[in-house]
Amino acid sequence: MGTAVEVRDLKAWFGKTEALHGINMSVESNHATAVIGPSGCGKSTFIRCLNRMHETNPEAKAEGEVRIGGMDVYDVPAVDVRRRVGMVFQKPNPFPTMSIYDNVAAGLKLNGTRNRTTLDDCVERSLQQAALWEEVKDVLKKKSGASLSGGQQQRLCIARALAVNPEVLLMDEPASALDPISTAKIEDLIFELKQKLTIVIVTHNMQQASRVAEYTGFFLMGNLVEFDKTEKIFTNPSDKRTEDYITGRFG
Amino acid sequence: MPSKFVQLRRQVTDRFFTGLAAGLSVVVIGALVAIFAYLVLRGAGSLNWAFFTQIQKPVGESGGGMANGIVGSIMILVIASCMGVPLGIGAGVYLAEFGRGRLGRLVRFTADVLNGVPSIVIGMVAWGLVVVRQKHFSAFAGGVALAIMMIPTVTRATEEMLLLVPQSVREAAFGLGIPQWRTTLSITLPSARAGILTGVMLAFARIAGETAPLLFTAFGNQFWNLSPGQPIAAMPLQIYTYALSPYDEWHRQAWAGALVLVLLIVGTTTLVRFVFLRRMLGGAR
């Protein structure tokens, strides 16, 4: 398989503080890549640079090259990038005033799709991909997205991201606010989803990284210390710092 | 384990402050109830069909009503709301979603100052802006004065309510590639709808009872007028005139007018709230 995301010398700032010091990474397509590291190491900042969410913070700035499927991310309008690179956040964030249906359809509707059949099909397909269809198919338009349980809300957010048919799905600690059963569901989902798209997942949970991802990158203080096959990172890391982190000596 | 004495002291303190809070709430609610009860007592007796259908009779004749004042007030309030609410919400959106830096601070400061300007001064401004140019008083001029009074309240309420919408909701929209203007219009504003509505209703209730800004803008009118370009009767103005008059009949009508004005405000606020909130709880759209 080819490369889905190519990152070259990516730097990011918050105000005057440099949060990422030149990151290089090639993300394999149709695989899951985990990003691990202690709090504040820049892992969230890193994936937020991939779909230009980083710059929604008024103080923030990013520089470098990110290529996704031939698109130079920092050379096209941010909204175009975000339509091709979906994102799932740490806390489930359904649109509070919208029904389940409207939540999933929001990306298409608010970007101009009006055709009912297209929307209906897309909502069903996305909810099925997110393994939520069976639980909500009878209350699609009756219940608001916010009335679901936390785990269901997160799968709703995944469905919402899938509805716009992204090539890459960025997940920023998608299970850290969920109970173990919901977490297992999300992890199962990641296995299914990478048949169709590329996943980059930030996680605090090293077991989770080893379960879901073929590749893992270890971040420390704004640097990508080591990036390799997950198995290699967890069994035989080449860098002392990686080893210290995964064996629990710090972080 | 704290000693018996400490336990007792804590219990007493707790009871005391709970009681104090309850007592103070009763005082506040009591004032409201007292005003309303007194209005009903003095005004309800003079309410009859004629009050809502007829205009004032010449002094000495009994009967007559405030129909022209009721209609006039409604017209002025509609004109004011049509101008004040969109401007206020627009400014609030600017402050919450875009207004960082100097211009934002300036707008916020201006809104706060405008909120503190005495209503009579705002009436003079509207007089200068509209009446002097048109060379006559008009319902429109009254509407302009009241609209100016509405703007700061609506602006700050909109801003505060939008800031209460979690940033994560905006991020979710940006993450889908929805442009900022779309996000504000279709996601952030609807999420804050209930709060903004309360702010608008608060502003509406406040201006509905204003007399001073209408004195030399809408001016008042003894007769029917349905043209926004002409001087028009308004309930607060009529209550004011009637209350200052020496005639008993007019005093009774002033009380009735005050009661109707309060009912008009309470009625509109409840109705708007009911209509909008029910639509929102429906979930979709």
Image (cartoon, coloured by chain):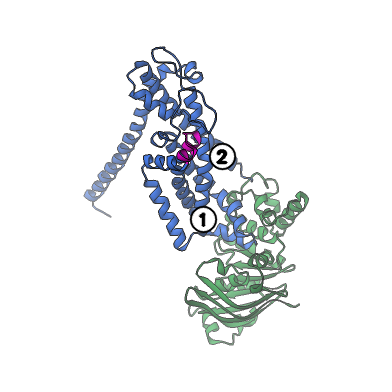
On screen, residue A89 above or below B77: below
Residue that carries the numbered disc 1 in the rendered image: B94
From this viewpoint, which residue is outermost toward the left? Answer: B5
Residue drawn where x is 36% and y is 20% of the image: B251
Residue drawn where x is 60% and y is 69% of the image: A52
- Measured Cα–Cα span from mark 1 to mark 2: 23 Å
Q: Is residue B258 visible?
A: no
Q: Is residue B164 left or right of residue A206?
A: left
Which portion, as a residue range, is magenta? B130-143
Q: Is residue A7 visible?
A: yes
Residue drawn where x is 62% and y is 77% of the image: A216
Q: Nearer the viewer, residue B274 or B281?
A: B274
Instruction: Give a yes or no on whether discs 1 and 2 share a subunit.
Output: yes
Find residue B136 and report its horizontal and vertical position in percent. 47, 34
Q: Residues within 10 Å of mark 1 (few under 14, many from 20)?
A: some
Quadrant containing the N terminus of chain B is bottom left
Which one of the lettered chains is coloured blue? B
Find residue A244 and report its horizontal and vertical position in percent. 51, 82
Residue drawn where x is 36% and y is 32% of the image: B32
Q: Nearer the viewer, residue A223 or A152?
A: A223
Tag 2 secondary structure = helix
Q: Nearer the viewer, residue B261 or A23?
A: B261
Find residue B3 and report its horizontal and vertical position in percent. 23, 52
What type is the residue that disc 2 sits on?
Phe
Residue that carries the numbered disc 2 in the rendered image: B276
